[in-house]
Structures are given as C-alpha cells and as structure tokens.
Amino acid sequence: MARFEQNFLTAIDIGSAKTCALVAELTETGLRYCGHGISDARGSRKGVIVDLDKAAASVQRAVEQAEQMVGAPVERALVGVAGPHVRGINSRAGISLGSRPREIGRDEIRAAVERARAFNLPEDRQTLHLLPQQFILDEQDGIRDPEGMVGTRLEAQVHVVTTSATAAQTVVTALNRAGIHVDDTIYEPLAAAEAILRPDERELGICLADIGAGTTDLVVYYEGAVAHTGVVPIGGDHFTNDVAVGLRTPIADAEKIKKSFGCAVVTKIPETNEVEVPSVGDNPSRLMPQRFLCEVLQARTQELFEHLRDNLRHAGVLELCGAGIVLTGGGARLTAIAETAEQILRRPVRLPLPAPVDKMPAELAAPEFAAVIGMIFYGNRMRMARSAQEQGFTARLRALFARKTGWPGTNPATSDQRRSGAH
C-alpha cells in the first residue's frame, strides 16, 4: 500500500456531465497510464455540487472502475475545482531591505510574496493558488527569480486564485465520503494548461478556455505567468437546453442531436439536410431542417464568445493574447466553434488534444479529458519540485555541517589540510 501511494498519482474530475478518475504510475522514464474510470455525473450543476450523496456515489463508481484496471485500491487523489465561485485577483506589495543594498535570499523572496498576498478576503473565500507573476527590485521589473541579486526594496506581483470555501470543502467532503483522501485541489484550467499549452504560447500570451458542461473557465498566460483567471457562466448544458427547447425534444435526445448534427455556423449546412427529432411523450418523431438546429447553436455560440471577449477586455488582458485562444473541454467539440470564436475575438483559435500519458488509451485523447490528464502532469511536476527542494535543503545542510563539524563520511582534518595546501 505504501509503495502504491508513493509511485502512483490519481486525479479526479467531478464535472456536471461526467466524473472521471485517472491513475498513472511514476516510472524512471516518466508517467505511465494505469487505469481510469468514468461515470455519469450526479449531484453537480453548473460546476457546483448540489447533492453530496449523489456526487460521492458518482466518484465512487468512477474510482471502482479505475481500481479494477489498476488492481489496487485508490485511497488518495488530486481533485479539480472550477465553476462560477472561482475568482482571480492580481496583487502587488513588497518589503524594504534596508538603507544599504544587500543580497536577496529565499527568505526575502518568501516575505515579499507573503506581503503581496496579505489582503483581506471575505470570510467565505479561501486561496486556491498563489502564483507569482514577477518581482520588482528597486523599480526594475520583469525579474523571474531575484535570488542572489542586490537591492534595497523587493516587491512581488502575484495572481491569487480564490474560491468559495463552502464549494471547495464540499468537493473535498464528496471525495471523503467516497473513501478518498484529497491530497490537493487544483483549478481545472491550470491543470488543462499542463496538458495543452506550449512554453512559447505562455510567453507570447494565450487564453485557455475550458468549455465544460456548466461553465467556461478561463486562464490567461503572459510572459510565462498567469495574468488572469475567470469564469463565463455558459457551458455545454446551455447549448443542449437550447436545442431541447427549440426542437421540443427531451434533454437526452437533444444532447445526442447536438453531438451528431450540431454546427456553430449555419451556412456550412446544406439547406436540404434534415434531422430526425424525437418528440416529448408518446408523439412520433419529426423531421426538421438541420439548419434550424444550427441556428439555435450559432446564437448560443456567439453569446458565449461575446461574454468571453467582454471578460478579457474588462480584465485588460485581451490585447495580451498574442498567441490567440485555445479551446478545450467537451463543449469545444462542436463543429465550426473555432470559426465563430475567431470572428468574435479576432484572435487565432486552435483546438488541441491533450498530451497523452504513456500507454494511455486513444479514447482519453479528447478535449473533455484535458483537465484530468493535466492534473496528473501538474501533480507530477509539484512532486518533482518538492523533491528537488528537499534535496537542495539536504545538500545545504550537509555543507553546513561539513564546515562546522564534519558530516559522516568526511574528514575535517583532511579538509583543513586541503584548505591550507598541506599534502
């Protein structure tokens, strides 16, 4: 059991349409797929859990499927958080280093970051991520890592992702009820970025829009750092509901019709095309023009990207997106959605597939799995960073003790001889 927890990573995505659990193994050559499970979402609406028992049961079903493939119990996991309750804040503050310039160390960097995050949050909010953007040393900005530099004042500019404390705790509680301990919570667009975005895009400026069932969640990168996070309260379920109302058909049938025949640009559909539409109740199915279906979807697509454009403009980051817009999530599968996005946002738009984990089945290489795959990459990167930090601390400790008393395996007398030049 201890070996499983040490060498494996599990990520769980609780969405409004599905719940997915993904397990990967950490090997000497990298991450390797071990198993996954998918269950229909229950108890979630618009990115928020509204029924704990149903959500926990959905998690349990997905985890049980993954456990059967892995051949071992899953007891710990990373979990994604998204939805209308997530908000991002940019903050800048710093510390004085004294009247005379002195060298910057990790303690000073940590103190500057803590000062930048020291603003009052409402009681019902909590910090999900603290993401440094840049450091400013004596008015010189654009510094990534000031360690070892010399100055009199150090400032940190950070982006803080906050969430509703209640909503975040509800996600943790749902996993706990399913028998899973939560190691960490991750904002899902940040996770998806791990599996999708390229380093040059993050530098030039890029917006990732994760179109989920309940909401579209955003993250904007500029010069390698997160510049903005936000939420547009429109997702795939809104498209489906529009189809159900417009075509007067049950929700389940509307979802199938949307996926099979939907298109975001009406003029791409021949005027003679028709779609069989099931009726509500016992009434017989009807044939309806496919263009009518697409008119409904085109209107909602335009609304989505107008809201997205306004969100980016209001935050002052639309002009920073030099590399354009990346669409992911299940809602990005709608045919011709990228064309509408380019027309409204006036930026290049691409729809990439998430980078695969080794041995991962082809069915998971789809936009709707970008977040859960990205959580695996994110968790692995965080684990490697902690390991490097621990190794660095151990090395500094070894050096300190070697200088003072001689670390086991060193000979202080021999060290003195080397320093004095004796043979």
Image (cartoon, grey):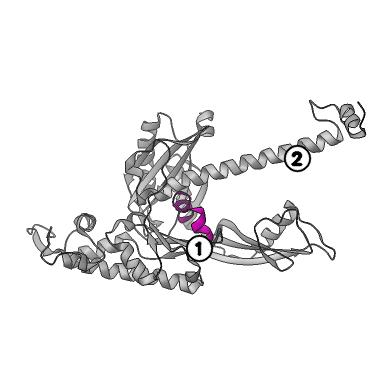
Q: Nearer the viewer, residue 160 or 29?
A: 29
Q: Quadrant of the C terminus?
A: top right
Q: Nearer the viewer, residue 244 or 321?
A: 321
Query: Residue at (11%, 64%) from the top-left corner?
Result: 288
User: Which residue corresponds to mark 2?
Assistant: 396
Amino acid identity at mark 2: Arg
Tell me the magenta residue range.
188-203
Looking at the image, can residue 54 be seen?
no
- Percent from the top left, x then y, of residue 253? 19, 55
Query: Residue at (57%, 41%) from the top-left corner?
Result: 383
Secondary structure at badge 2 equals: helix
Name above or below for residue 372 compared with residue 89: above
Mark 2 or mark 1, whichever is nearer to me: 1
Q: Left or right of 289: which side holds 91?
A: right
User: Which residue corresponds to mark 1?
Assistant: 205
Q: Left or right of 65: which side holds 160?
A: right
Secondary structure at badge 1 equals: loop
- Percent from the top left, x then y, of residue 38? 34, 43
Of callouts 2 and 1, which one flags the residue occurring earlier in the amino acid sequence?
Answer: 1
Circle 2 residues within 10 Å: few <14, some 14–19, many ≥20: few
Name above or below for residue 20 compared with residue 208: above
Circle 1 residues within 10 Å: few <14, some 14–19, many ≥20: many
